[in-house]
Image (cartoon, coloured by chain):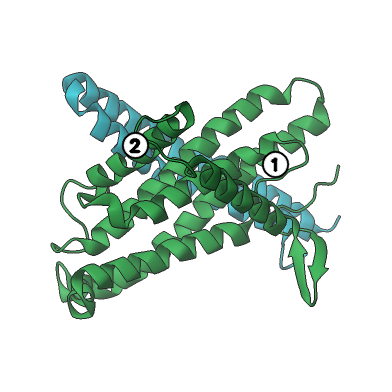
């Protein structure tokens, strides 16, 4: 039995010299879905919310509450980034439920782009909150001897963010593919339910880790505030 | 099938099987400790479970690294 390699994606069509692969097209679809969906839902906001507006407010409030608790900062500045990351990942991970659609997060390139966004956001918010000098000084905490380790950690945690998302989503898709080729009807359904759970948990974890990274970058007292999560391996 | 293929398949199988043991033990310990903490202090359940999820993701990364190595051996082997 031959399986397509999960490390390469096949090209759908090309715009000029740029080949457009399937994950990119799916990403565009999800982006359009989220953009149009939120535009439609926020078009006429009212004081007495409709059902859809109430549901949307619940989602936004929950994410804002999580940011407030985890980062101990006013969520207004970070809500667009974290909320978009979470919702995009949730929709992307669950998009495999539509027949014929592979989640774009099951390819390494999408995850690399997302991890790069978090990496850039960490630096940007850190510099913005503390100023360049003070932010650089946080790398020398608790001792200047640990500065190389802190700098290495900055890169390895972005790398692990990428590999974690890729491994989880891709292994789910791959496993369903294997089971589907062995027993077609109804057998993959429990696995797909498990995959939905994994997708939701991974979206949450990606958002939570982005919050922890940015939170540790904007806090005055060193690379990692007290009573926060352990930093990644 | 030459010996490089054979070695890659064996290497992938061993990577994932041995690499799954330690994270499994670690996750078991982490969940047990979190259960203990929630049982002692139910009002801290929110914080504990959030930290638990993030911690489990960290531990799981080790197994995921093994999975990626196995996939590299099977699908993107530089020697085969």
Q: Position of residue A148 (x, y in %)?
A: 29, 75
Residues under numbered marks 2 and 1 in contact, where contact means CB atoms less than 8 Å apart: no
Q: Position of residue A107 (x, y in %)?
A: 64, 55
Number of numbered markers? 2
Tag 1 secondary structure: helix
User: What is the chain letter for disc 2?
Assistant: A
Cα distance between the residues tagged 2 and 1: 32 Å
Residue toward you, B17 or A36: A36
Residue toward you, A227 or A40: A40
A171 versus A223 height, above or below: above
* Other-residue count near label 2 (Cα within 10 Å), few / some / many at <14 / 14–19 / ≥20: few
A32 versus A148 height, above or below: above
Quarter-wise, where is residue A18 in the image? bottom right
Residue toward you, A202 or A39: A39
Q: Nearer the viewer, mark 2 or mark 1?
A: 2
Q: Position of residue A201 (x, y in %)?
A: 47, 37
A3 versus A213 height, above or below: above
- Which comes sooner in the sequence, label 2 or label 1? 2
Quarter of the figure with the C terminus of chain B: bottom right
**One can see residue A153 in this view:** no
Quarter-wise, where is residue A195 in the image? top right
User: Chain A's colour?
Assistant: green
Q: Residue at x 21, y 76 (%)?
A: A131
**One can see residue A179 in this view:** yes
Quarter of the figure with the N terminus of chain B: bottom right
Chain coloured cyan here: B
From the image, tell me which residue sits under label 1: A174
- In the displayed structure image, the side of residue A132 where residue A221 appears, left or right: left
From the image, tell me which residue sits under label 2: A62
């Amino acid at each position: 039995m031959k399986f397509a390699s999960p490390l390469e994606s096949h090209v759908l069509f090309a715009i000029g010299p740029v080949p457009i692969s399937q994950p990119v097209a799916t990403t565009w679809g999800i982006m359009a879905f989220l953009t149009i969906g939120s535009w439609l839902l926020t078009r006429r906001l009212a004081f007495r919310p409709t059902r859809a507006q109430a549901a949307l407010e619940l989602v936004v409030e929950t994410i804002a509450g999580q940011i407030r608790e985890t980062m101990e900062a006013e969520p207004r500045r970070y809500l667009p980034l974290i909320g978009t990351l979470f919702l995009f990942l949730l929709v992307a991970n669950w998009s495999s439920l539509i027949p014929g659609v592979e989640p774009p997060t099951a390819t390494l390139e999408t995850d690399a782009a997302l991890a790069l966004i978090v990496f850039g956001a960490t630096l940007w918010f850190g510099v913005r909150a503390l100023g360049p000098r003070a932010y650089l000084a946080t790398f020398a905490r608790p001792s200047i001897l640990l500065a190389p380790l802190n700098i290495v950690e900055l890169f390895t945690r972005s790398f692990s963010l990428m590999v974690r998302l890729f491994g989880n989503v891709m292994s789910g898709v791959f496993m369903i593919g294997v089971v589907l080729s062995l027993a077609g009807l109804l057998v993959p359904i429990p696995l797909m339910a498990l995959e939905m759970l994994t997708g939701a948990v991974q979206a949450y974890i990606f958002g939570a880790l982005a919050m922890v990274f940015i939170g540790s970058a904007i806090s005055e007292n060193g690379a990692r505030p007290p009573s926060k999560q352990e930093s990644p391996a | 099938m030459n010996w490089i293929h054979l070695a890659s398949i064996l290497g992938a199988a061993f990577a994932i099987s041995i690499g799954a043991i330690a994270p499994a033990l670690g996750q078991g310990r982490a969940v047990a400790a979190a259960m203990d903490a929630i049982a002692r202090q139910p009002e801290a359940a929110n914080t504990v479970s959030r930290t638990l999820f993030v911690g489990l993701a960290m531990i799981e990364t080790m197994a995921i690294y093994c999975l990626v190595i196995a996939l590299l051996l099977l699908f993107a082997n530089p020697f085969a």
